[in-house]
Image: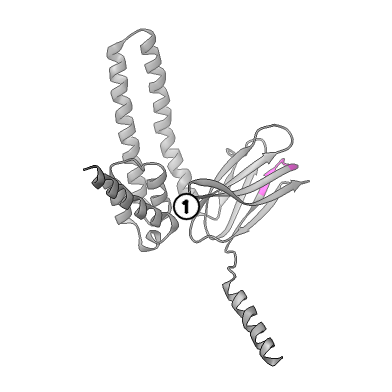
Amino acid sequence: MKNFWVLFSFVLVLFSCSKTENNTEISGTVKGLKKGTLYLQQIIDTTIVTIDSIPINGNGEFAFSLQLESPEVLYLFLRKTEGTEFSDRLDIFAAPGKIEVQTSLKNFENDATVTGSVNHQKWIDYRKLMQRFNDRNLDLIKENFESQQTNNEERMSDINQQMELLVRNKYLATVNFALNNKEYEIAPYLAISEIFDANIKYLDTIYTSLSTAVKKSTYGKELEKFILERRNLEKARE
């Protein structure tokens, strides 16, 4: 009997040691939301997977708890059951610790403010930078359409050159942004999500510049693996 209790105690200790405690809390309020379901989602093997959900009934407050190895992009997916048939998804560059999200039912994505994550703020800065390129691209598309209507081939050729230059400048701006933020996980994330098809020398430059801690992060490891796959693919084509 004594041996049984010794074995039982050992099993309990082993179980408690193997259990991983959550290190990340994502909480906040969706103003105006009375009824619906919030889903916390994560990309696993290139697929968005729901890892937790909370039914909302009466107020828009929510709180999720999870384990994160390092800063990572997660998604808050709102399935509405009133007001509109559409659903919304909000991107959050989460990090271990406490993340607070404040947003609204009316403008779930645009009204969102996220605090507690430096990487998320860096991501917002990057999006503002890219918006200028996106606005210019829309202008060129409009100009190109107008040139087609008047059959102005010379103008169309000039616009196409401007579009190509705009794409190159957009890629270079992303590379520079990543290099200027090499101490943060946003750097390898942008490399694999925004400029994955760029010249491999740019991806390698970003990876080499990363701090040791960022290289060991989820996105740091993914960037290293991606560069290796790109190199092997290019060698196979030679």
In the rendered structure, the answer to whether residue 67 lies left or right of residue 62 reads: left
Q: Quadrant of the N terminus?
A: bottom right
Disc 1: CA contacts within 10 A as few (<14), some (14-19) or many (>=20)? many
In-front residue for pair 185/87:
87
Is residue 111 found inside the magenta-colored segment of the image? Answer: no
Residue found 48% across the figure and 44% down from its top: 124
Residue found 52% across the figure and 46% down from its top: 47
Q: What's the coloring here?
A: one colour
Q: Is residue 112 above or below residue 133?
A: below
Rendering quarter of residue 37: top right
Rendering quarter of residue 170: top left
Q: Magenta segment range?
A: 29-35
Q: Is residue 206 above or below residue 8?
A: above
Farthest residue toward the top? Answer: 150
Secondary structure beneath dot 1 equals helix
Indicate the amino acid at tag 1. Asn
Q: Is residue 6 above or below residue 31?
A: below
Relative image position of residue 20 (x, y in whole percent):
58, 68
Relative image position of residue 52 (x, y in whole percent):
64, 53
Total labels: the figure holds 1
Farthest residue toward the bottom? Answer: 2
Relative image position of residue 181 (x, y in whole percent):
38, 52
Q: Is residue 170 above or below residue 201?
A: above
Residue found 42% across the figure and 44% down from its top: 193
Q: Quadrant of the C terminus?
A: top left
Farthest residue toward the left? Answer: 238
In-front residue for pair 212/31:
212
Residue found 48% across the figure and 54% down from its top: 118
Q: Residue beneath label 1, please?
A: 119
